Image (tube, rainbow, N blue to C red):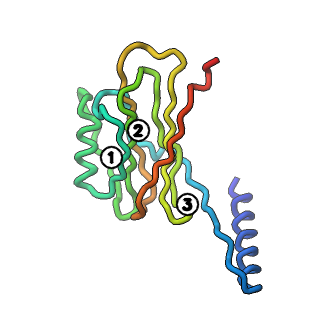
């Protein structure tokens, strides 16, 4: 799976070297966003800890402790605070605000793209919403960047809707 990426990067390097050798400007390379995996997802819930829509990048321990305390405040026995190395990592928080049970919010991918840190958030609405309130929340760990975070929003219906 990594071989095509290596070939692509080598090819892009050759194009850049060729353009520079001819005196032209190097082409702009757009880096692929890294997908958020299950191992980097720190917490997901649909309780009322965050009742408003929130997009937040956490880059320090004090803020992380506050966010974690709020995120887990509705749990009878809150899970322990996950360790985050803020010299290498940051935490992204996406809360959807009031929705319906079965609705979801997910940080799908994140990374630097053309000089901007982009976090892609997908909000998925259920096919037949249950008439009650839910507050979807997703918290993920990603590689640290000091760039301002731009949130790319994607909305869709659940894939099993007809």
Q: CA distance from mark 3 to mark 1?
A: 28 Å
Residue 47 is situated, as x and y percent measured from the top left of the image, at 32, 27
Q: Secondary structure at mark 3?
A: strand
Q: Which residue is mark 2?
A: 138
Front of the two marks 2 and 1:
2
**Residue 93 placed where, x, y %?**
37, 44
Left or right of 27 on screen, residue 52: left
Give SS at disc 1: loop
Look at discs 3 and 1 and give the one toward the viewer: 3
Q: Residue furthest front?
A: 24
Name the residue at 34% across, 60% down: 86
Mark with earlier residue (2, 1): 1
Q: Determine whether, in the image, residue 63 is placed left or right of residue 129.
A: left
Mark number, residue 113: 3
- Above or below, comparing residue 6 to residue 44 in the picture: below
Above or below for 25 versus 56: below
Closer to us: 8 or 129: 129
Q: CA distance from mark 3 to mark 2?
A: 22 Å
């Amino acid at each position: 799976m990594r071989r095509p990426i290596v070939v692509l990067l080598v090819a892009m390097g050759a194009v850049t070297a060729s353009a520079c050798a001819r005196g032209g400007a190097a082409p702009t390379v757009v880096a692929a966003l890294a997908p958020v995996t299950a191992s980097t997802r720190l917490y997901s819930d649909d309780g009322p800890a965050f009742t408003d829509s929130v997009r937040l990048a956490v880059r320090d321990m004090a803020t992380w402790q506050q966010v974690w305390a709020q995120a887990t405040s509705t749990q009878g026995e809150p899970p322990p605070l996950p360790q985050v190395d803020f010299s290498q990592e940051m935490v992204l928080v996406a809360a959807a605000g009031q929705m319906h049970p079965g609705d979801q919010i997910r940080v799908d991918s994140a990374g630097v793209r053309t000089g901007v840190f982009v976090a892609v958030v997908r909000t998925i609405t259920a096919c037949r919403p249950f008439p009650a309130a839910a507050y979807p929340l997703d918290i993920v760990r990603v590689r640290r960047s000091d760039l301002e975070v731009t949130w790319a929003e994607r909305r869709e219906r659940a894939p099993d809707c007809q």
